[in-house]
Amino acid sequence: MKAAAPAPAAVLDGAGRRFAIAAGRYNHEITGRLVDGAIAALTEHGVGAGDVRVAWVPGSFELPLAAQRLAQAGGVSAVICVGCIIKGETNHDDLVAHAVAAGITQVALATGVPILFGVVSANDREQAMARAGGTVNRGREAALAALEMAAGGGR
């Protein structure tokens, strides 16, 4: 059996591109780190400081509508959605996480603008913090995916 060919390298050049970040304010200690990670990744790859707009919304549930508004306003190569959903005593977190994921997908398909999912869904605050700059930063990862998609990824 033949080994699969290696995947081509991602194109991560953000020079001359503009991005928007829709960020949920709920669990701000975590979402602030996600925003910082996303901005750092974008600027490290040539995006100018003035070419990143951050739009804060109350929480993760509001991210799809914010992403839709940002995408429809035009002028952005991609929208990065960051938020944090932490499991509680009920299944409310599952309802919110499913709605957010489906909404973000719908916005991307309806607008044709890459809408990236950088929402942390964790069982507890410790897990959420680990995904917001502890061992990884989901905001940074979403920004790298945004750079690749803005350069024509998936074509």
Image (tube, helix red, strand yellow):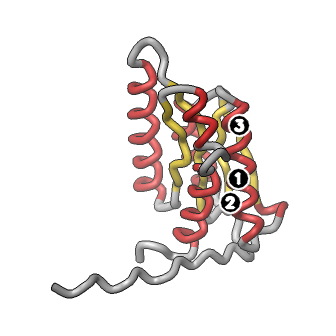
Residue 17, quarter of picture: bottom right
Residue 34 image offset from top left, x and y in percent? 67, 45
List the residue tagged with mark 1: 37
Nearer to me, 115 or 31:
31
Residue beneath the point at 39% across and 41% down? 102
Instruction: Give the class, few, some or many, for how many residues have Cα within 10 Å of label 3's Cα (few <14, many ≥20).
Output: some
Residue 124, placed above or below residue 40: above
Tell me the quarter of the picture where residue 74 sits. Answer: bottom right
Quadrant occupied by the N terminus: bottom left
In the rendered structure, which amino acid carries the disc numbered 3? Trp
Residue sticking out furthest to the top: 89
Question: Can you tell which mark lies on residue 49?
Answer: none
Of callouts 2 and 3, the N-terminal one: 2
Q: Amino acid at mark 1?
A: Gly
Say which of marks 3 and 1 sits in front.
Answer: 1
Disc 2 secondary structure class: strand
Residue located beneath label 2 in the image: 19
Nearer the observer, 87 or 11: 87
Instruction: Determine whether label 2 and label 3 are within 8 Å by CB.
Output: no
Spatial distance from mark 3 to mark 1, Cα to Cα? 16 Å
Alpha carbon of mark 2 to alpha carbon of mark 1: how far?
A: 14 Å
Pointers 3 and 1 in contact (CB under 8 A)?
no
Which disc is residue 56 wearing?
3
Could you tell me residue 51's position as x and y percent? Answer: 78, 62
Outermost residue to the left? 1
Q: Residues within 10 Å of mark 1 (few under 14, many from 20)?
A: many
Q: Earlier in the sequence, mark 2 or mark 1?
A: 2
Residue 29 versus residue 117 in the image, above or below: above
Residue at image coords 53%, 77%:
10
Compare residues 84 and 151 and report the one nearer the observer.
84
